[in-house]
């Protein structure tokens, strides 16, 4: 969200349509000059990246215009809800950098909603219907054909009241009755054709236990909760646009003064190579396709956190993508660029060799070591340096040596020179192979007058490679994460999502060599492995097995593959 635009001394910034609406309301003095929003998740799962967009606009608008944003759990379906999800949602919101003014639950309002429903029955605006869900659906009609009235639509008020009380007694079976609003079965908007207000559920609620058996539907509970709380701007995604007339109708039945919350709808967040369907995400967890809701390949906020994403990168991206009235699919490369941009500014540069091969500098004194200085972050002059050990024997990446190299190969090959990052210029003199013909060691000679930081000798080399010393490096596990799906739009693909999974979404490398500086790293610490990508320490790490997760590669390899 942009900063407040109410200060006349600030340069005018481009506003999204929600900001325009808020500013107009403030100018007109609506709602006594108040701005109040809410973030209303259902506690039936973990938040995903799409929820992050809603969080940013809900909390951002309130902060921008000096208002408040409440956290309200839409806990109207006890079958799917759990305290575990309540706790995780709170934790994810805080991680994103936001704080709520108050915590509410839709279940806080169950008594008021019940009384309101009773009043609607007394006013002839609601009735109990004993038809099955299938019968009710058939009678709804079609968008071009009016529905037909329920045979129970004109039931006497006293009978409706008696049956409504029985719905909440626990003596009636689920699905045997519902309470419907009495509106218009010929309305062009099918949501206005006598929508269901209450249904029977026999399942303990995570807060109210077995106090209730009749539970309000979302369309009935949501707007009334907004009204009871004093919400001024109720922000939803575009699929609720067709629900707005019903939202307004229910509030009109409840309101006693001029105050009305207003619903605004914005575009959902969707990314390529990503599925946000809770049903599919749940299947991947339950079928052990992924390791859990915080698997770093998961599009959940917990998954992104574990993978090494920062809250700053997500907030900035949401502002860049913006809020419109048109749905679309965003390139996942935007998200990856966002985290690269942020980590480039804050991540410490280190050396890690993922596929090691030994380099022996034959003219360097045996047993001798020296301390080199490595810059922590060239983007931050205050980041300082750290020490690294240089020795006769080093580990380098296997693909940094080729015995028979093509013309434009500027790394180690017999007769060629490269600079060892933060070290010396070395010239390759050959290699040793094992009994299978594989290169086991590479040999080189160094020039002691070319140490990094020395006056320029005038010698120019085209290649620079990273390394770690065999004297103090340690082994670690590296998990290379990549996109979960191989098709751009898995949500639009008719095939089963399991057929679309990327078999290379996770590669586990053992025996990677890490420079000694990384021994003190803690869970969540973020680094740039020179020439490789951005990585963080995983929660599965132990003292004897340090694990690094790749957050993102240094460059977008998928874009190159598409060009080919």
Image (cartoon, rainbow, N blue to C red):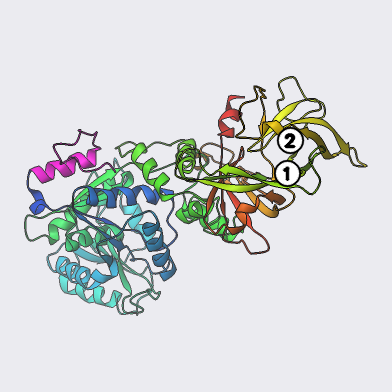
Decide whether residue 5 is among the magenta residues.
yes
CB contact under 8 Å: marks 2 and 1: yes
How many C-alpha atoms fall within 10 Å of the one at disc 2: few (<14), some, or many (≥20)? few
In the image, the segment drawn in magenta is 1-27
Q: Is residue 466 left or right of residue 403?
A: left
Residue 47 image point, x, y percent: 42, 56
Camera-side residue of 50 and 325? 50
The disc label shown at residue 399, or none: 2
Residue 10 image point, x, y percent: 19, 36
User: Is label 1 in a helix, a strand or a loop?
Assistant: loop
Decide whether residue 330 is among the magenta residues.
no
Looking at the rendering, in which quadrant would you find the C terminus? top right
The part of the image, by quadrant, that contains residue 500 is top right
Looking at the rendering, in which quadrant would you find the N terminus? top left
Residue 289 visible in the displayed image: no
Residue 422 image point, x, y percent: 63, 38
Q: Is residue 184 left or right of residue 57?
A: left
Q: Is residue 97 left or right of residue 529?
A: left
User: Is label 2 in a helix, a strand or a loop?
Assistant: helix
Residue 327 image point, x, y percent: 36, 37
Q: Residue furthest right?
A: 435
The part of the image, by quadrant, that contains residue 197 is bottom left
Q: Residue at x 21, y 59 (%)?
A: 226
Question: Which residue is disc 1 drawn over?
Answer: 355
How many C-alpha atoms fall within 10 Å of the one at disc 1: few (<14), some, or many (≥20)? some
How far is the residue under mark 2 from the one under mark 1?
8 Å
Camera-side residue of 333 and 473? 473
Q: Residue furthest top?
A: 407
Vertical arrangement, residue 437 with respect to residue 101, above or below: above
Vertical arrangement, residue 214 with respect to residue 380, above or below: below
The part of the image, by quadrant, that contains residue 2 is top left
For the image, the number of numbered tags is 2
């Amino acid at each position: 969200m942009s900063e407040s635009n109410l200060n006349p001394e600030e340069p005018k910034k481009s506003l999204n349509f929600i900001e325009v609406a808020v500013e107009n309301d403030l100018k007109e003095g609506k709602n006594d000059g108040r701005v109040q929003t809410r973030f209303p998740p259902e506690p039936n799962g973990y938040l995903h990246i799409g929820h992050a967009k809603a969080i940013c606009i809900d909390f951002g608008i309130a902060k921008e215009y000096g208002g408040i944003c409440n956290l309200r759990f839409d806990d109207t379906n006890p079958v799917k809800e759990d305290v575990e999800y309540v706790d995780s949602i709170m934790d994810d919101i805080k991680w994103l950098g936001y704080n709520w003014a108050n915590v509410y639950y839709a279940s806080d309002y169950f008594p008021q909603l019940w009384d309101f429903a009773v009043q609607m029955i007394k006013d002839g605006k609601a009735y109990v219907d004993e038809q099955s869900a299938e019968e009710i659906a058939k009678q709804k009609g079609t968008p071009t054909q009016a529905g037909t009235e329920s045979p129970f639509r004109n039931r006497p008020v006293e009978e409706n009241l008696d049956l409504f009380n029985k719905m909440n007694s626990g003596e009636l079976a689920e699905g045997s009755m519902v309470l419907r609003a009495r509106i218009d079965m010929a309305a062009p908007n099918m949501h206005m054709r006598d929508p269901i207000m209450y249904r029977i559920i026999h399942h303990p609620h995570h807060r109210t236990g077995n106090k209730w058996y009749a539970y309000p539907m979302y369309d009935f509970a949501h707007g009334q909760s907004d009204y009871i709380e004093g919400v001024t701007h109720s922000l939803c995604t575009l699929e609720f646009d067709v629900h707005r007339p019903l939202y307004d109708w229910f509030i009109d039945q409840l309101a006693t003064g001029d105050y009305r919350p207003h619903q605004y709808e914005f575009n959902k967040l969707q990314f390529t190579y990503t599925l946000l369907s809770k049903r599919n995400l749940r299947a991947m967890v339950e079928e052990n396709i992924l390791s859990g809701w915080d698997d770093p390949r998961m599009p959940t906020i917990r998954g992104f956190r574990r993978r090494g994403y920062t809250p700053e990168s997500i907030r900035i991206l949401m502002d860049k993508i913006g809020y419109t009235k048109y749905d679309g699919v965003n390139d996942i490369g935007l998200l990856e660029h966002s985290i690269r941009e942020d980590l480039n500014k804050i991540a410490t540069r280190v050396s890690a060799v993922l596929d090691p091969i030994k380099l022996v500098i034959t003219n360097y004194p045996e047993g001798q070591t020296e301390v080199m200085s490595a810059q922590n972050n060239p983007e931050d002059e205050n980041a300082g340096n750290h020490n690294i050990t240089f020795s006769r024997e080093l580990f380098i990446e296997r693909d940094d040596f080729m015995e028979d190299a093509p013309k434009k190969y500027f790394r180690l090959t017999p007769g060629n020179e490269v600079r060892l990052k933060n070290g010396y210029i070395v010239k390759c003199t050959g290699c040793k192979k094992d009994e299978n013909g594989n290169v086991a060691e590479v040999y080189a000679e160094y020039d002691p007058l070319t140490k990094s930081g020395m006056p320029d000798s005038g010698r120019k080399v085209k290649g620079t490679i990273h390394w770690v010393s065999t004297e103090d490096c340690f082994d670690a596990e590296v998990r290379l994460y990549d996109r979960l799906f191989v098709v751009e739009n898995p949500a639009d693909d008719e095939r089963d999502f399991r057929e679309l999974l990327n078999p290379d979404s996770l590669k586990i490398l053992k025996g990677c060599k890490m420079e000694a500086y990384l021994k003190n790293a803690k869970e969540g610490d973020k680094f740039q492995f020179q020439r490789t990508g951005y990585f963080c320490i995983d929660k599965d790490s132990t003292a004897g097995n340090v694990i690094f997760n790749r957050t993102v590669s240094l460059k977008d390899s998928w874009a190159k593959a598409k060009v080919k």
